[in-house]
Amino acid sequence: MLRRSPATLDELIWDVQGNAEQRTFAQALWDRIRREFPELRIYRFFDKPVGPHPLAMFEVNLFTPAQFGAFISWLVINRGPLSVLIHPNTEDEERDHTQRATWMGERLPLDLSVFRRMRENNEAIGEKANPE
């Protein structure tokens, strides 16, 4: 599995499905981030839940302390009604999304069963690769 450097941080920015005002705000914020922070990796807008994330969202990757300082301080002021999950990327994705995570705005429940299924799949692949 391709892993990002643990030095990267994900910023996951959510809007509430069915809330047209939040969707419009989130799209405008996504556009602003792309214009004002072209050095960041900004992923497409996901219109439905992805992985453990319960709502429509987009992801931004930060790579340096300078990017973190500039973007997080900007986001504190400009995120509006949206919730933001900030977490590192290490080999322990569940812990990254829970114990190591920081929230701006409302803390939203995550579907942590995704991580259990990933562990089970990885174990099954390992068993097939190393039969006894």
Image (tube, grey):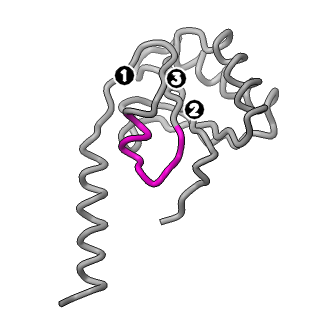
Place of residue 100 in the rendered image (x, y in percent of width and height, measured from the top left): 45, 34
Amino acid type of the residue that numbered disc 3 sits on in the rendered structure: Val
Question: Which SS class for mark 3?
Answer: strand
Q: Residue at x 66, y 28 (%)?
A: 30
In the image, residue 58 sits, relative to residue 117, either above or below, namely above
Left or right of 1 in this view: 69? right
Residue appearing at x 29%, y 37% in the figure = 111
The residue at the point 41 percent across, 47 percent down is 93
- Magenta segment, which residues? 88-98
Mark 2 closeness class: few <14, some 14–19, many ≥20 residues within 10 Å? many
- The percent position of residue 61, horizontal first and vertical second, equals 64, 40
Instruction: Please say if the residues under marks 2 and 3 sit with CB atoms less than 8 Å apart.
Output: yes
**Label 1: which residue?**
108
Q: Earlier in the sequence, mark 1 or mark 3?
A: 3
Number of marks in the rendered image = 3
> Where does label 2 land, which residue?
11
Which residue is labeled 3 in the image?
A: 84
CA gap, disc 2 and disc 3 = 6 Å
Residue kind at label 1, given as amino acid type: Leu
